Amino acid sequence: MGATVPEPAGSPARHSELLGLAVRLAREAALLASSMRSAAITDIATKSTRTDVVTAADTAVERYVGAALRRLRPGDRLLGEEAGERAGDLGASVRWILDPIDGTVNYLYGLPQWAVSLAVEVDGQVVAGVVRNGGTGQEWTALRGAGAYRDGRPIRCSEVTELGQALVATGFGYAPARRAHQAGVLAGLLPAVRDIRRFGSAALDLCLAAQGQVDAYFEKGLNLWDHAAGALVATEAGLHVTGLAGAPPGPDLVLAAPPAIHQRLHDLLVELDAAGGA
Ligand code: IPD
Ligand code: CA
């Protein structure tokens, strides 16, 4: 028998190994955040505006995951919401993308709609992702090309074909000027859809769309850590996940919709200038 040849970072076996580690870290991270909440450790500071908070748990979770990755995979890079980009090996092909608590305001208020979101990028492409709802214990996972799962069971997006029948989730930024513009977009959208939902966690919104509990989701102003894992879950569940005019999802727009209504919703959002404003 010859020596075992290590799998290249781009191979499916490696991707599923990376997902396994992501799931383990997300579970530990969610447990840490939950225990800090039970112990009422919710010291807060503000970031971009007075309503954009960072709790002690956001920072603790990011430190925890960062330390674990340094120990277990010292050559990888990490992009986290609170600390930004941490450089690893210069030639590192693997980058971890972490939102330590997505839905921080829900976490602060004890609403069970917040999540740890952890994605793994290999050579610039997200190949694995996990979103764990720390309030309920529900967990969504996806591997590129291998489907999306909720608690180990395969999930699919809705089969809605009419925009007027679509339940659409969205979210708002923290800056007042952006919110004022977003309110205008909603005023134009509401008469054209079944209804709107605003749950407070972009990562979970994408997962709800992935299992058909909302039909579609859009938001302007998201950062990569908000949507990296959830967008893979949504894509693998059959949604079309894009930005504007076929561009990849990004700060201008993240739009996740079933194929039959994607173009119509996209065009209406363009008409309403959803990617514009502050
Ligand atoms: C926020 C949530 C929210 C979305 C905001 C995000 P945070 O992330 O995902 O649903 O509307 O745009 O910034 O601040 O809770 O990590
Ligand atoms: Ca976030």
Image (cartoon, rainbow, N blue to C red):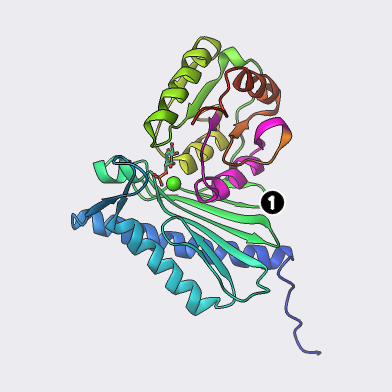
Residue at the extreme left: 40
Q: Residues within 10 Å of mark 1 (few under 14, many from 20)?
A: some
Relative to 157, 84 lies left or right: left
Q: Residue at 37% of width from left, 41% of height from top?
A: 113
Amino acid type for the residue under numbered disc 1: Ala
Residue 121 part of the magenta-drawn span: no
Coordinates of residue 159 in the picture (x, y in percent)? 64, 25
Q: Residue at 56% of width from left, 19% of height from top?
A: 166
Q: Quadrant of the N terminus?
A: bottom right
Front in this rendered view, residue 7 or 41: 41
On the question of residue 202 being in view, the answer is: yes
Which secondary structure, mark 1? loop
- The answer to whether residue 259 is above or below residue 31 is above
Magenta stretch, residue numbers? 217-245
Front in this rendered view, residue 53 or 47: 47
On the question of residue 239 being in view, the answer is: no
- The answer to whether residue 82 is above or below residue 179 is below
Relative to 245, 209 lies left or right: left
Count of marks overlaid on the render: 1
Q: Residue at 62% of width from left, 17% of height from top?
A: 271
Relative to 244, 168 lies left or right: left
Which residue is the site of mark 1? 146
Snapshot quadrant of residue 103: top left
Coordinates of residue 111 in the picture (x, y in percent)? 29, 39
- The answer to whether residue 107 is above or below residue 176 is below
Front in this rendered view, residue 240 or 146: 240
Snapshot quadrant of residue 40: bottom left
The answer as to whether callout 1 falls within 8 Å of ligand 2 is no
Coordinates of residue 277 in the picture (x, y in percent)? 51, 27
Coordinates of residue 8 in the picture (x, y in percent)? 74, 72
Q: Residue at 60% of width from left, 32% of height from top?
A: 255
Residue at the extreme right: 2
